[in-house]
Image (cartoon, coloured by chain):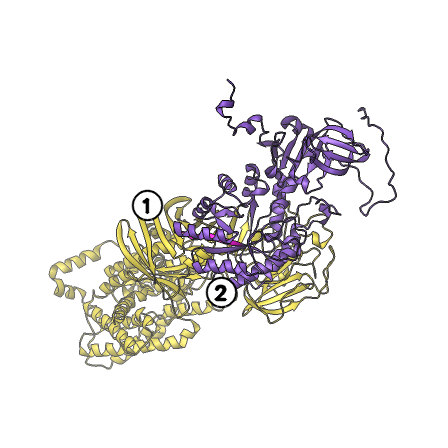
Chain colours: A yellow, B purple
Amino acid sequence: MKRTTGQFGESILNSYSQIFFSDNRVFALMLLGVSFTDLYAGIYGLLAVLVTSLTGFAMGFDRNTVAKGLYGFNSLLVGLGLGIYFQPGIVLTLIIILSAIFTFFISVAMQGIIGKYNLPYLSVPFILAAWMVTLATREFTTLGISERGIFTINEMYILGGGRMVAVYEWWNSIGIARPLRIYFISLGAILFQYNTLAGMIIAAGLLFHSRISFSLSLLGFFTAYLFYGITGTGISDFSYSYIGFNYILTSIAIGGFFVIPSYRSYFWVVLMVPLVALLTISLSSVFAIFSLPLFALPFNLVVLLFIYVLKFRTRPSPSLAEVVIQQNSPERNLYSYVNELYRFRYGVTPVKLPFFGVWEVSQGYEGEYTHKGDWKYAWDFVITDSKGLQFKGEGLELSDYYCFDKPVIAVADGVVEYVENGIKDNITGEVNLVKNWGNTVIIKHADYLYSKISHLRAGSVTVNEGDKVVQGEVIGHCGNSGRSPYPHLHFQMQATPWIGSRTIKYPLSYYIHHEGESTFSLKNYYAPAEGDRVSNAVVNDLVKSAFKFIPGRDIRFRVSVNGKEMDETWEAAVDEYNNRYLRCSETGSVSWFVNDGNMLIFRHYDGGRRDFLYWVHLSLYRVQQGFYPGLKLHDRYPLNLYVRRWLQFFQDFVAPFFLFVRSEYQLFYKSTDSEISPTRIVLESVHTNRVAGFVTRETRSEIVITESGISRISIKGKGINIMAECREQV
Amino acid sequence: MEKKEFERPYIKKIRAGVPSKFGMPVQAEPVTHIDGVPVAELITDFGSPLFVISEKSIRRTYREALEAFRSRYPEVQFAWSYKTNYLDAVCRTYHSEGSWAEVVSGFEYDKALSNGIKGSQIIFNGPEKSRDDIVKATENNSLIHIDHFDELYMVTEVAETLGKKPRVAIRINMDTGIYPMWDRFGFNYENGEAWDAINRIMMTGKLELTGLHTHIGTYMLAVNAYAVAASKLADLAVRIERKYETSIKYIDMGGGFASRNTLKGAYLPGRDTVPSFDDYANAITGALLNSEINPGRLPLLILETGRALVDDAGYLLGTVLANKRLSDGRRSTIIDAGVNILFTSFWYEHEFYPAKHTSDHLEETTIYGPLCMNIDVLRESVAFPLLRRGDNFVVKRVGAYNMTQWMQFITLRPAVVMIDEAGKPHIIRERETVDTVTHNEIVPTHLKSE
């Protein structure tokens, strides 16, 4: 019940902010306030939203969609529009209730019709409903046209007497440049408030909500303004109807909301806005016949067309990417997109190296010898000694080669699809071009994901077609069969199960890159290059068990934040889409993570920045669940996670073009009490923000892991001192 | 032109025409330099006799061994067997390569700690561990390898007293098809004693059974014995997991890999018959990988190889004291290094080399040490060129056991020098003096002269 009430409140507020593609509460309240500058319009707008939300919840529509205001905002626009045009009264109330429900139904229908093409319905339901009602109301004789908008000063006088009129006059006489004035009024016009004050409040709210949206609103508006100027179209038309909001909304939608903001999305704004202007002018002449206002029709047409067109690209560019997970803020969309691009480039099935120990890549992706054309995404591996040689002695015998006859293992769990085991090993220097792949094992790991390992020693393959194998299981031994002059291991990933299948780009999930004798780094979702010395990363049971976070378990902490003691409980859970998260029972903040048994990765955080869970999210952002003293694990935070708000504010403006703030994470494996069966391991992570190389913020966390799991977390930095002891896990 | 050396004439039986399968007897190649440092210079600088250790050789052999195992098995760890050579410089070289320490006494344990090794990286083996040793090892999180039931009871008692769970492994002896079977250390696999020990450990719950250890013998030439041992331990690990749901964290295969020295009585020279690290690695890892252990959870493989790692790195340098003819006409050469410092000459036919070029004429020679004891024979019979008094010789492959088992007897023990990777000699153990011997002696007052 409490949840429904909360969601109901959310649905009301979100219906307001959703008009500007936002879910910002403060912005919503500002818009709510603006809508009430015309009292009756405000009331009728709110009424329409209430009716829609009630209907939505009562009829059993998806609670989240209703709560997000996705149905409400069209009804709101209808309510506001009708409320401002007609005299208040019972008839109008009735009409608004009906049209709110009508708008809601259109929204749902549109969702069904174009939702399957992954298209939003924008404000189309509002436009349709508003036209229908407008046309019909001409016959409603009892419904009076409101004169409020026309005799403004009279109203002012009624409301606040002479003083109010004076203030109004003074306000209007302030020297705001004409274009800017039109900009503000156009903004206000979105809520049917044709005055600069409303526009200014909305602009301020927009700036508060999103710097990118704000700058896009200016870009869109002034591009159109310029276009009108150049084409010599009556600028008065432009200013009179304040149809300018079409350009503003188009700009925000194309430039930053449905597309990840980038220099290319801004470029398309500059191209599309004149198109909207063109449509506005041409459609006005059509709709003038029916004396119907255009409302936001040009915006809807162009934006829908643009988004639909983008979907048909066969080579989508990463710099003009559609938003997949809508976070209702261009900044959030951009930062998480950039971050995810950095953190998660490839697939979900973790693939490891097919051998034990340290091997060297003798030929990598697009290698100069054989990794070409359809087979360019493959690796060849050999073992080399400290002098870089692949063999001892003269290298004439196969057994002189370090890699010869070494065990070869499955790179991931799967089923053996194909085995070739009877091809003779070549003597050194000769190749077999007839059976060029030599002895080969192909394993199916997932749909459209196969690994192929070739040039195995004749008769060494220990698995049969149809066998189930697990990662790490020996499947054969390195040999010299096929097109292999010297013993080496060929490894590739492919989407089809055949021996000559083309390769696919599928980098390794995790591996250790040995840079020197004792220097190494952990690479993830990375393709080792020729000359790299690599080995598999190893998992530590203690660390692994500490981060299991079994769904249904509660972990209780005694936390002291800057000296303030409190209890905090995390609920480990998993949602219906198998997304796993930790939820703080006290604050309700949620931290989403993935854990494939090798790597723990915190992906997304929802909640306040003062919460303990927020700091844990930062502290354990990425943990390879092994123990590697001397290893530094790097990662980057999205810029809206750890960067201070004021700094982010400035970054936001230029974010589509360049990022001057770096927000980074580093993890160290500090100490262990035993290498074999540790009972206490200490990890340390450092979180750093840099602007042009200068550290602007740094905090450090120390995480103590014992057999009972995470036992202690301490976080220290400027202005933050957190000490948390795990009480129990239930 | 250099003046040629005079060599006394002698009569030699011609044996031409009957080469052995290895061809004609070869000329004695001299060893003039060790890692680029002239032998004569070493003796001038540090005295004679002199032990020399090559750091380069230690590191090269270690890496070769590690690579042999690491490229066949996911996790491998070497633990330096202290008793083989516990000179600090040697131990630290191994530790710097990543090797842990394997010790068999409280003394060695302390030495390992003083060499900067963490307690958790010390494996405590052997039948002799005092209660104090066990307490110390428990507190330092070391791995205690239990050898017999009395020790098991003691460790359990210590665990109770300290309230701490020591990490233990049990040493297991078994029939691996070799003779003689080593059954004096650890618990027997075949007669059920091993299970008895495991059950006791698991039932009391006072100890953490982390590993299984075996050491099947020493100077093992049969790699198959290791395969048998490894698969028996793997079976045990699987059955322990099945019975007690406890996973065994490591399998310690001990040591015993042969070095390339030739054992006395062996028909063929060691360097031709001894298996390589690859052979041992293949046998051991093959058995573990083919066992029933889940490939995703293979235990750490620990190896305690000593001899095979360090033997090649050690040289003994010395000087000829005299030559003489024995009653049967055989030549004998007396040198300044005796069996008391070259202890391994009791087991090996050590390879003696002249330190400079000599004539091609080799004569069957007996090499005697300097001790006034009949047993001081270093080689009964060796084809050796004539060296004169004051000439130097080199004995190869003496790195294992000599510098730990040597004894001060009649003469003082020589200095030990380590040549670093850059070819620079460093003295790592001073030559003993009279004071070294008398330091711990106490003369009762009544015997002290006025």
Q: Nearer the viewer, residue A460 or A363?
A: A460
Q: Where does residue A459 sit, x and y in percent of width and height?
A: 69, 64
Magenta region includes residue B167: yes
C-alpha gap between disc 2 and disc 1: 53 Å
Q: Nearer the viewer, residue A127 or A96?
A: A96
Q: Is residue A249 left or right of residue B336?
A: left
The three-letter amino acid code for the residue at tag 1 is Lys
In the displayed orientation, state which residue is furthest to the front.
B446
Residue B174 appears in the figure: yes
The disc numbered 1 marks a residue on which chain? A
Q: Residue drawn 36% across and 52% down?
A: A713
Q: Where does residue B62 sit, x and y in percent of width and height?
A: 61, 45
- Give me the disc on residue A718: 1
Q: Where does residue B2 sit, x and y in percent of width and height?
A: 80, 24
In the displayed orientation, state which residue is furthest to the top.
B450
Snapshot quadrant of residue B172: bottom right
> Element type at marker 2?
helix
Location of the N terminus of chain A (image quadrant): bottom left
Q: Neighbour class for label 1 at 10 Å: few (<14), some, many (≥20)?
A: few
From what the image shows, is residue A397 above or below residue A23?
above
The three-letter amino acid code for the residue at tag 2 is Lys
Residue B36 appears in the figure: no
The residue indicated by pointer 2 is B243
Magenta region includes residue A291: no
From what the image shows, is residue B191 above or below residue A496?
above
Q: Is residue B325 left or right of residue A305?
A: right
Q: Which residues are magenta?
A: B163-170
Q: Nearer the viewer, residue B376 or A437?
A: B376
From what the image shows, is residue B144 above or below residue A205?
above
From what the image shows, is residue A303 above or below residue A531?
below
